[in-house]
Image: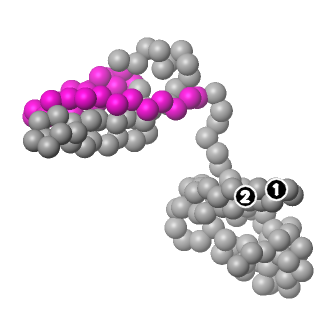
Amino acid sequence: MQLDSHAIADMPSQKRAAFVNSVTGFKSANLVGTATTEGATNLAIMSSVVHLGSHPPLVALIIRPGGEERHTLAVLVTNEPGVLARVIGLFSGRGYNIESLTVAPVNEDESMSRITIVTSGTPMIIVQMP
């Protein structure tokens, strides 16, 4: 289903209110699609969508503030007990934020793993990371 602003504005008041209230749904992730007047489309997953009103139909998207860069770090480690805890301790002990973390074996005998860490911060903070 695709609705433009005219279709939403032409809905009866109660139907429009129910529609706008249902847009954000019960789940924390929402698919938000946009299209430019030239026809270029974009689709994004938004986790912070807030209903503001139904006449006019308004929702707010809460977006991460600018100024912080995201960086992905890949660390190759030997699979030994406590290695993950030591690597993560380098970040948490200095107060760095880890946005996501994955670990996967990189060879057939699983003696080595790659720890992938996504972190964010201002350029001044990023250069200080371990």
Provide the residue span drawn in magenta. 68-95
Q: Quadrant of residue 20?
A: bottom right
- Classed neighbour count for the residue bearing mark 1: other residues with Cα under 10 Å, few (<14), some (14–19), many (≥20): few
From the image, tell me which residue sits under label 1. Answer: 36
At label 2, which amino acid type do we have?
A: Thr
Q: Is residue 114 left or right of residue 24?
A: left
Give whichever of 95, 101 is nearer the camera. 101
Position in image of residue 53 (x %, y %): 78, 66
Q: Secondary structure at mark 1?
A: loop
Q: Secondary structure at mark 2?
A: strand
Q: CA distance from mark 1 to mark 2?
A: 7 Å
**Earlier-in-chain disc, 1 versus 2:** 1
User: Which residue is rendered at x = 70% and y = 79% of the image?
Assistant: 1
74 inside magenta stretch: yes
Q: Quadrant of residue 25?
A: bottom right
Q: Quadrant of residue 55?
A: bottom right
> How was the colour assigned to the protein in this rendering?
one colour
**Labelled pair 1, 2 in contact (Cβ < 8 Å):** yes
User: Which residue is rendered at x = 82% and y = 56% of the image?
Assistant: 36
Give whichever of 35, 82 is nearer the camera. 35
From the image, tell me which residue sits under label 2. Answer: 41
Note whether residue 55 is visible.
no
User: Which residue is rendered at x = 15% and y = 30% of the image?
Assistant: 78
> Compared to 98, does 123 lie above or below?
above
At label 1, which amino acid type do we have?
A: Thr
> Compared to 41, does 104 lie above or below?
above
Query: Where, quadrant-wise, is the C terminus in this rendering?
Result: top left
Position in image of residue 70 (x %, y %): 52, 32
User: Which residue is rendered at x = 85% and y = 56% of the image?
Assistant: 38
